[in-house]
Image (cartoon, rainbow, N blue to C red):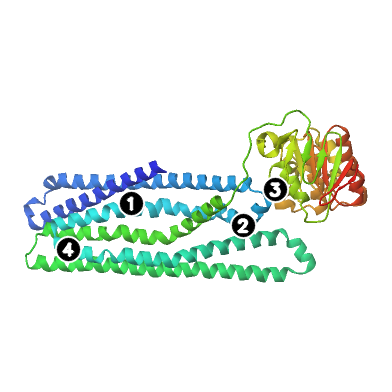
Amino acid sequence: MRRFLIATTACGVLIAACTIASAVVLAGIVARVITDPASRSVGELSTPIAILLALWVFRALAQWRQGRLGQHGASAVIADLSDQVLTTATSLPPRQLAAHRDEAAVVITRGLDGLRVYFTTYLPSLFLAAVLTPATAVVIAFYDWKSALIVTIALPLIPVFMVLIGLATADRSAAALAAMATLQSRLLDLVAGLPTLRALGRTGGAAARIAELGAAHRRSAMATMRIAFLSALVLELLATLGVALVAVGVGMRLVYGEMTLSAGLTALLLAPEVFWPLRRVGAAFHSAQDGKTAVQAAFRFIDTAEPPGAGTLGVPGDSVTVEVDDPELTAGPGRVTVLTGPNGIGKSTLLQAILGLDRPTEGGIRINGVEVAELDPQQWWPKVAWLAQRPVLIPGTVQENLELFGPLPDLRSACRAACFDEVLATLPDGLQTVIGRGGVGLSLGQRQRLGLVRVLGSAAPLLLFDEPTAHLDGPTEARVLDAITRRAADGATVLVVGHRDPILEIGDAVVRMGGARVAP
């Protein structure tokens, strides 16, 4: 970033130098042609014309280079910030991530794109204004101090109006970002739930709510655009009046012979260049404001979130034994440990804490005698297969979803164990059938079976199941529970969360959260 700023500033200095020099040279050429008819021959003007063309070429090249630097700088910063937001998001506990999911998604997918305008247009214009505007005013003062005085009086009005306009648009940009986040979240939820809404005859209510959110976002965006157009009108008016005053003063003094034609033309040519960078900054300010608002949201998300620290140790041994202090339980190889208790008491959170995704509320969790917090997640997670309450499904083929966490040693046997072979027989393209976001295209029971395939087909020594038979009928539930007990008999450590009698019956040990062990 520092190199980009330095290079952009250097390009701005070169552009300013070429702009001022070309105005001086052009004024000299025109003055010679008008006041000295003998010097109108091409031979005598070839040198200054060549210098003028060279200055224009150098300025064009400097502007092209500055544009490329702006694109590279914007891409690098956007990629870096997106990476930081994603890293923070993936390190958060699931509950905390759910609270910030919509904000992080909008910042990454759309908000940070506004930074491209900031780096490619606004920031170069700001550097150019910092260099070209004062340098041009100094050169005008050298040729005509009265024109420089007019410019100096008119010039401060532009930054004052820019500050006032910036204060007015900052809140509107934040409101537009929040409205966009809400609208995007509602739209995704609506698209995912359309079949259910149609079945219940409730599509009208959702459409009305989406229309209301869309209207709120449109009003916010149009209000910002209205301020942008009015501010552009004010800035253009101030710049035009400033140049007009300079032109009138120069014209009057030329008529009365109080200044040379060369000096007057130089002042006239340079007067617009004094205001042009600030006008460009004002025009780009509103486009860049959305990006700055998104950056503030990104930094706020990164700074306020506190991802759990990751350890560096590996898991000793090939098998896995889990020891938990609260509730007191020990899950070892060859055994099925069932964790039960009322809803909301923290059973799913405990599984997440065993994975290292969350911190235990009380006590400690040890894996083969090592605290989970001290384990390196990249070494620990390959030893665990986890079925969450809602299996993670991505847009793609069924096979891609089955192998989302890595290839399965025996996919066919895993599908039979989870009764997913029956599902595959009904799909039009079998394993190559394409499903949507969250498993759209599959029923809840089919999604559950797909998630079971990934766990039952994994070679991991620790299997975690969170309500594994949810959305399954009785015969399918019996087959799945039998497959789970077989995995334990083969030497895996199995920890199951459930409360229904069939699940409790397969447990070698049943632990009730908030109570005592209820089975040996």
Question: Closer to the camera, 326 or 197?
Answer: 326
Q: Tell me if residue 400 can be seen.
A: no
Residue under label 3: 394
Q: Position of residue 239 (x, y in %)?
A: 28, 65
Q: Decide: marks 3, 1 in contact (CB < 8 A)?
A: no
The reply, left or right, for residue 269 in relation to residue 467 is left
Q: Earlier in the sequence, mark 1 or mark 2?
A: 2
Residue designated by label 4: 147
Callout 2 amino acid: Asp
Relative placement, left or right, of 440 versus 338 is left
What crowding class fits label 3: few (fewer than 14 Cα within 10 Å), some (14-19), or many (20 or more)?
some
Which residue is at a point 31% across and 57% down the rendered structure image? 277
| Labelled disc at residue 102 | 2
The residue sitting at 75% across, 45% down in the picture is 351
Q: Secondary structure at mark 1?
A: helix
Per the rendering, the mark at residue 356 is none
Quarter of the rendering occupied by the C terminus: top right
Q: CA distance from mark 3 to mark 1?
A: 45 Å
Disc 1 from disc 2: Cα separation? 35 Å
User: Which of the two discs, 2 and 3, labels the residue nearer the N terminus?
Assistant: 2
User: Dot 2, how many residues are within 10 Å of its Cα: few (below 14), some (14-19), or many (20+)?
Assistant: some
Task: Check disc 4 and give the amino acid type.
Answer: Ser
Report if the CB atoms under discs 1 and 4 are less than 8 Å apart: no
What is the C-alpha distance between the residues marked 2 and 4?
54 Å
Which is nearer the N-term, disc 3 or disc 1?
1
Residue at mark 4 to residue at mark 3: CA–CA distance:
66 Å
Point out the tag, 2 or 4, that comes first from the N-terminus: 2
Disc ID at residue 127: 1
Of label 1 and label 4, which has the lower sequence position? 1
Describe the element under mark 2 as helix, strand or loop.
helix
